[in-house]
Image (cartoon, rainbow, N blue to C red):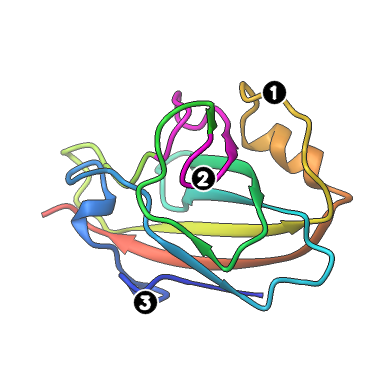
């Protein structure tokens, strides 16, 4: 599988519109070579450079129908119906995409890792679930995964 975004390259800078300093909307994600038998997709977004923590989860979304394009600006809410049906878990205290937004005293560039998982099922977990519960529920159902890293440094 391959995950990419037309708005920024792997290991490239994320446009401000996808951050908490801009519109804070999810980018369009493109997926190639989805494994045969994929029933649904799940996506996580993690800040890999949080001081004193290993990672900070910014987004957990699952039960997305298998498709090669995940549209930009998915709505807020625990269950969304358009433009795709999906469940959004509790990531960074909200049921929505939360893009990069380092505190004002942190000027260092951070890496944000989008991971897409191809699953052989639809998950039946609560939308109050966080990333740990999502990973546990997916454990025996992952057919493939791919990553995309975007970087962001506040001005």
Q: Which residues are magenta?
A: 81-97
Q: Which quadrant: the N terminus?
A: bottom right
Residue corresponding to mark 2 = 55
Which residue bears the numbered disc 1? 126
> Residue visible at 53% across and 46% down?
84
Q: Residues within 10 Å of mark 2 (few under 14, many from 20)?
A: some
Q: Secondary structure at mark 1?
A: loop
Viewer-side label of 3, 1: 1
Q: CA distance from mark 3 to mark 1?
A: 33 Å
Circle number at residue 9:
3
Residue visible at 73% across and 43% down in the picture: 135
Residue at image location 23% in from the left, 37% down from the top:
103
How many other residues sit within 10 Å of disc 1, few (<14), some (14-19) or many (≥20)? some
In the image, taking residue 133 as reference, residue 99 lies left or right, namely left
Quadrant position of the C terminus in the picture: bottom left
- As drawn, the residue found furthest toward the right would be 140
Residue 43: horizontal and vertical position, in percent?
58, 51
Q: Nearer the viewer, residue 67 or 127?
A: 67
Tell me the SS state at disc 2. loop
Q: Position of residue 132 (x, y in %)?
A: 68, 35
146 vs 102, left or right, is right
């Amino acid at each position: 599988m391959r995950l990419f975004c037309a708005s920024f390259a792997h290991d490239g800078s994320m446009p401000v519109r996808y951050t908490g300093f801009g519109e804070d909307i999810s980018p369009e994600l493109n997926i190639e070579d989805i494994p045969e038998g994929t029933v649904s997709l799940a996506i996580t977004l993690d800040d890999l450079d949080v001081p004193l923590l290993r990672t900070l989860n910014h987004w957990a979304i699952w039960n997305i129908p298998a498709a090669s394009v995940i549209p930009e600006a998915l709505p807020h809410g625990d269950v969304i119906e358009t433009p795709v049906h999906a469940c959004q878990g509790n990531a960074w205290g909200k049921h929505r995409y939360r893009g990069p937004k380092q505190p004002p005293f942190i000027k260092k560039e951070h890496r944000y890792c989008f991971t897409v998982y191809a699953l052989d099922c639809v998950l039946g977990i609560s939308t109050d679930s966080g990333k740990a519960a999502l990973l546990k529920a997916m454990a025996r159902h992952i057919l493939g995964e791919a990553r995309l890293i975007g970087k962001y440094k506040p001005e």
